[in-house]
Image (cartoon, rainbow, N blue to C red):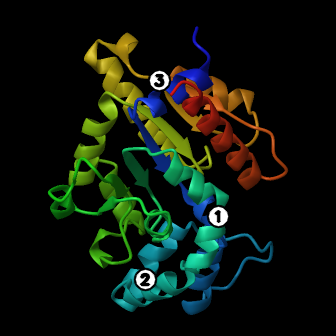
């Protein structure tokens, strides 16, 4: 069996890999956690906080209630836009964002709403096209990295996937961005970073990828896909392996440092053969 890191590095070198970026990357430059968003909605809606200090509801359920009570997500989106923003200088100092740009993935999908990836590409002088809706697909250029805002973008309220209804609607996987992802992913290696493997939305996405190949009858020809895990977890690794996903990890004092070390090693291996 080929070494998983070598296989991933080869796909990166051939520009035949897609990067999927989660909240952990944005949190590395100081963006709030989902728990902070949950607490803000509880405070604004005057919902009593549990004595344990743990949120009583998921942020998707609270966002659904917020829209029902307030009539729209406009005020919440404005709060998120302000609080999900960091200075360009902080993005410039981010090792993770620099490495993502330097690895030169032709397509980057992200479930993050913020503009940090776009800012990183601007700072490091790399061309990109933001894709947040069907109209943006027509603007794709072969000479520019696609940054696909899979769960929406602050520039367009209607694109945000935030409430429970939004997430349930996405489970059908028939939106323009879902169709694009299926087409992009079918013949490419995928690397997921910055995600909690307990995130059911990502688990469903990974399962759907496996199911698509299994139903095709050509599962043995599927390109390898990978997920970065800051710490080894034999249970999760076995389940992911069942779906054709290899888990990769790296040493580090915290998840951000571990991810940075992993991306550095990936970049070093990918450039060795050039």
Picture coordinates of residue 52 (x, y %)?
Answer: 80, 72
Picture coordinates of residue 243 (x, y %)?
Answer: 49, 25
Mark 2 — residue?
Answer: 77
Q: Which of marks 3 and 1 is in front?
A: 1
Depth check, front residue: 95 or 190: 95
Quarter holding the N terminus is: top right
Numbered circle sitting on residue 94: 1
Question: Is residue 63 found left or right of 49 in the rendered image?
Answer: left
Tell me which residue sits at (61%, 26%) in the image: 5
Tell me which residue sits at (28%, 12%) in the image: 217
The furthest residue to the right: 253
Report crowding for label 3: few under 14, some 14 to 19, many 20 or more residues within 10 A (C-alpha): some
Is residue 259 visible to us here?
Answer: yes
Q: Nearer the viewer, mark 2 or mark 3?
A: 3
Mark 3 — residue?
Answer: 224
The quadrant in which residue 263 appears is: top right
């Amino acid at each position: 069996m080929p070494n998983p890191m070598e296989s991933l590095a080869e796909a990166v070198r051939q520009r035949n890999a897609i990067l999927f970026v989660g909240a952990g990357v944005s949190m590395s430059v100081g963006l709030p956690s989902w728990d902070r968003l949950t607490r803000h909605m509880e405070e604004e809606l005057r919902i009593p906080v549990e004595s344990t200090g743990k949120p009583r509801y998921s942020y998707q359920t609270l966002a659904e209630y917020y829209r029902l009570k307030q009539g729209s997500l406009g005020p919440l989106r404005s709060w998120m836009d302000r609080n999900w923003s960091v200075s360009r200088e902080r993005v410039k100092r981010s090792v993770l964002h620099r490495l993502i740009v330097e690895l030169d993935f032709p397509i980057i999908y992200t479930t993050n709403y913020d503009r940090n990836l776009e800012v990183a590409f601007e700072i490091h002088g790399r061309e990109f096209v933001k894709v947040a809706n069907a109209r943006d697909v027509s603007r794709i250029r072969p000479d520019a990295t696609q940054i696909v805002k899979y769960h929406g973008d602050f520039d367009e309220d209607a694109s945000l996937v935030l409430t429970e209804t939004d997430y349930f609607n996405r489970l059908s996987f028939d939106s323009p961005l879902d169709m694009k992802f299926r087409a992009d992913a079918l013949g490419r290696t995928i690397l997921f970073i910055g995600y909690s493997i307990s995130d059911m939305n990502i688990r469903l996405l990974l399962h759907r990828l496996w199911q698509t190949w299994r139903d095709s009858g050509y599962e043995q020809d599927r390109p390898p896909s990978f997920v970065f895990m800051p710490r080894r977890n034999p249970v999760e690794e076995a389940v992911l392996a069942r779906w054709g996903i290899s888990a990769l990890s790296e040493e580090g004092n915290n998840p951000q440092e571990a991810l940075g070390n992993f991306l550095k090693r990936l970049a070093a291996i990918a450039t060795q053969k050039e």
